[in-house]
Image: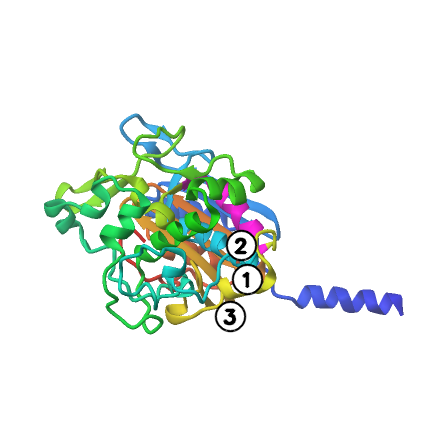
Amino acid sequence: MQGLLSVLLLSLCLAAPAGAAVPAEFIDRYAAEHHFSGTVVVQQNGRIGYEKSFGYASIAFKVRNTPQTRYRIASITKAFTAVLVLQLAEQQRLDLQAPIRRYLPDYAGSGGDAITVQQLLNHTSGLPNFDQVKDLQTALSEGVPAYQKPATPAQLVSRHCSGAPVAAPGSTFDYNNCDYIVLGLILEKVAGKPYEALLQERLLQPLGLRHTGLLRQGRIVDGLADTYMQRDDLHGLADDLPVYPENWYAAGSLYSTAADVLAFSDALFGGKLLRAESLAAMTRPGLDDYGYGVWSYAMTIAGRPHRVVKRPGRIMGAQTQLFRLVDDDTTIVILANTDATDLDEFAAAIARQLFGGEAGAGRKAAGTAGR
């Protein structure tokens, strides 16, 4: 009987679909062909199968990117913020169904009694969109006012996130940095400490994320890659526009390494940060397949559906991708310091190679520059 059981188990293992070896040559070739500058890490079943860096952290000084390079991770920040909100909700210090004004009694917006914490998390608040500058030409001619003048979190909320709702709360998905800026201020009020301190206490220190932190214009970060964006008018790459990175606050102001982002992902999906029901709520697709701080959807590869939880980010030349194939125990982290490569396509192409399909398009996340 024991021998028969062993044979049956072996047969099941052989029949079960599994990812192939990490396609190193494919990734190298794709990076070269698409002028990728940054770091790629692929992990399967808890083992890193690929880790490599390309391009320059500083083009002017010819300093190459390495696995230790720190990158601006843009809206991967939102996943960190969503976890903090859910942790406080688990402790019953914060109610996802409560309106903004319960936690911010001085909130001036007319939606303060109608917009809930949950609607901020899933971008259905209906608040006017924070990012009014939608194209490079406008940014070059008029600047990006929301990010080019220093502001405290309270000033950001007062100046940009207190307008009358433009849609009924809960009715419409609109990717909006305002939602997570308001959430950041709510976290500060509930916890009684700055967002940065809460982040350190609950995530960075417990997980040993020593290479992750908050960007500030006046703070020099060792090993931080410069960022560059494509300029058609200049026929190549140029420095990003001058901004105050802290103005992205709880929506997009973090820097990190690929290894630290992977460690955060491992802790999140390994059940170390949230209870199972909270993680399920965070990754449950709602409008636009968006949960709380992440997109969640099924990707078909070689005729089989694969459940994906994805957190992309983009602020000018800073591009990021945290791409988790949930049921396949596979994580792809791509951090870049130029916008030359479409990271949605890059991550999807790697996934298709891993699981037997052809390299091709994956589902693109909605959002604007600064997502």
Dot 3 or dot 1, earlier in sequence = 1
Q: Nearer the viewer, residue 294 or 46?
A: 294
Determine contact: label 3, label 1, CB under 8 Å. Answer: no
Relative to residue 291, is residue 41 depicted above or below? above
Dot 1 or dot 2, earlier in sequence = 2
Residue 90 sits in which quadrant?
A: bottom right
Q: Which residue is mark 1?
A: 278
* Residue in the image at 36% along x and 60% along y: 101
Q: Nearer the viewer, residue 23 or 49?
A: 49
Determine contact: label 1, label 2, CB under 8 Å. Answer: yes
- In screen coordinates, is 3 left or right of 186? right
Helix, strand or loop for disc 3 = strand
Q: Which residues are magenta?
A: 255-269
* Residue in the image at 37% along x and 55% along y: 104
Q: Which residue is mark 3?
A: 305
Q: CA distance from mark 3 to mark 1?
A: 24 Å
Q: Which residue is mark 2?
A: 87
Q: Nearer the viewer, mark 1 or mark 2?
A: 2
Q: Residues within 10 Å of mark 2 (few under 14, many from 20)?
A: some
Helix, strand or loop for disc 2 = helix
